[in-house]
Image (cartoon, rainbow, N blue to C red):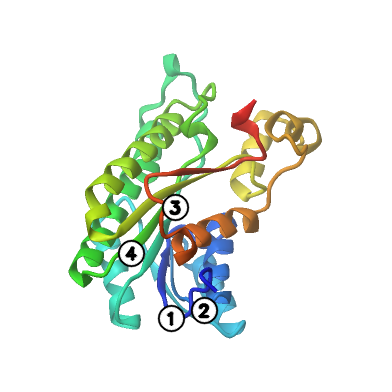
């Protein structure tokens, strides 16, 4: 029963597709009221509609997480629609860069940092402020990556951003533990998402030849497998966990 989210209010950023959509839908299945946030209105609304059609409660809020005003409005929407905020999964991200450090494209670098790092920081700022106003705790999950711990060639911005997400998570966990606010990270490995498929297309590789290098199971993970970790860390079942990084990577970082 501790994994039930009945009556809780959750925000999921980047919830239009992939891991974000799967996480938002799982929150809905477990009884949470979900604020579905995405910069893409079409996919974001589709996720919110799917939750409602399945008998859950959800509202879509368009937000560019790199913009403070959008993130603040997202949190305010949770309060206006559902009365409060209990947890958040900061998942929004953009496709990794594709240049070595010696050939960094400044515009590409800035975009990745703006969304994948600054977006997490701004989201936490607004979410934590609401938790502190309520005064009764809360939980945040930031989405890192195996690239938070193991560098990848030709991804300097993405690797830097995902390393920094772990640092932000740890700082926020230290600062907010006295307020019973838990802040953790989930670090996915090779998960079968549009982003991963796009990366494979860029490098000209197939799942059959690439998956064994990224997974001890020899397969890509599913978005629902990451969603389970996200929702669990937001639930009361993880009540004694903060400042942690949970690897959902089929052992990739262990070898």
Q: Is residue 163 above or below residue 142?
A: above
Q: Which residue is mark 2?
A: 31
Where the N terminus falls, by quadrant?
Answer: bottom right
Q: Which residue is mark 3?
A: 92
The secondary element bearing badge 2 is classed as loop
Of the two numbered discs 2 and 3 in the rendering, the one whose residue sits closer to the viewer: 2
The reply to whether the C-beta atoms of the residues labelled 1 and 2 are less than 8 Å apart is yes
Q: Position of residue 56 (x, y in %)?
A: 54, 82
Disc 1 or 4, which lies upstream in sequence? Answer: 1
Disc 1 or 2, which lies upstream in sequence? Answer: 1
Marks 2/4: CA–CA distance:
17 Å
Marks 3/1: CA–CA distance:
24 Å
Q: Position of residue 118 (x, y in %)?
A: 31, 44
Residue at x 20% of width, y 64% of height: 132
Q: Residues within 10 Å of mark 2 (few under 14, many from 20)?
A: some
Q: Residues within 10 Å of mark 4 (few under 14, many from 20)?
A: many
Q: Which residue is mark 1?
A: 7
Disc 4 or 3, which lies upstream in sequence? Answer: 3
Marks 1/2: CA–CA distance:
6 Å
The secondary element bearing badge 3 is classed as loop
Disc 2 or 4, which lies upstream in sequence? Answer: 2
The secondary element bearing badge 4 is classed as strand
Q: Is residue 148 left or right of residue 224?
A: left
Q: Is residue 125 above or below residue 77?
A: above
Disc 2 or 3, which lies upstream in sequence? Answer: 2
Q: Residues within 10 Å of mark 1 (few under 14, many from 20)?
A: few
Q: Which residue is mark 4?
A: 138
């Amino acid at each position: 029963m501790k994994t039930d989210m009945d009556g809780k209010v959750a925000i999921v950023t980047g919830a239009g597709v992939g891991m974000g959509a799967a996480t938002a839908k799982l929150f809905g299945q477990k009884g949470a009221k979900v604020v579905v946030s995405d910069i893409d209105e079409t996919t974001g609304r589709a996720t919110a509609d799917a939750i409602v059609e399945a008998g859950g409660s959800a509202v879509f809020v368009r937000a560019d997480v790199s913009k403070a005003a959008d993130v603040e409005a997202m949190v305010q929407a949770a309060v206006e629609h559902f009365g409060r905020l209990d947890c958040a999964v900061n998942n929004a991200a953009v496709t990794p860069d594709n240049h070595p450090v010696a050939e960094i494209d400044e515009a590409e670098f800035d975009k990745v940092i703006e969304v994948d790092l600054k977006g997490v920081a701004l989201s936490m700022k607004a979410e934590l402020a609401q938790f502190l106003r309520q005064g009764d705790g809360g939980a945040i999950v930031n989405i890192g990556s195996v690239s938070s711990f193991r560098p990848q060639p030709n991804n300097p911005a993405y690797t830097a951003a995902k390393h920094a997400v772990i640092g932000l998570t740890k700082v926020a966990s230290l600062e907010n533990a006295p307020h019973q606010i838990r802040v953790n990270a989930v670090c996915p490995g090779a998960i079968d998402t549009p982003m991963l498929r796009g990366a494979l297309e860029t490098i000209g590789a197939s799942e059959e030849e690439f998956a064994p290098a990224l997974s001890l199971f020899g397969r890509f993970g599913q978005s629902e497998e990451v969603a389970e970790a996200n929702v669990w860390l937001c639930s009361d079942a993880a009540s004694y966990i903060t400042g942690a990084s949970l690897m959902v990577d089929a052992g990739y970082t262990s070898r």
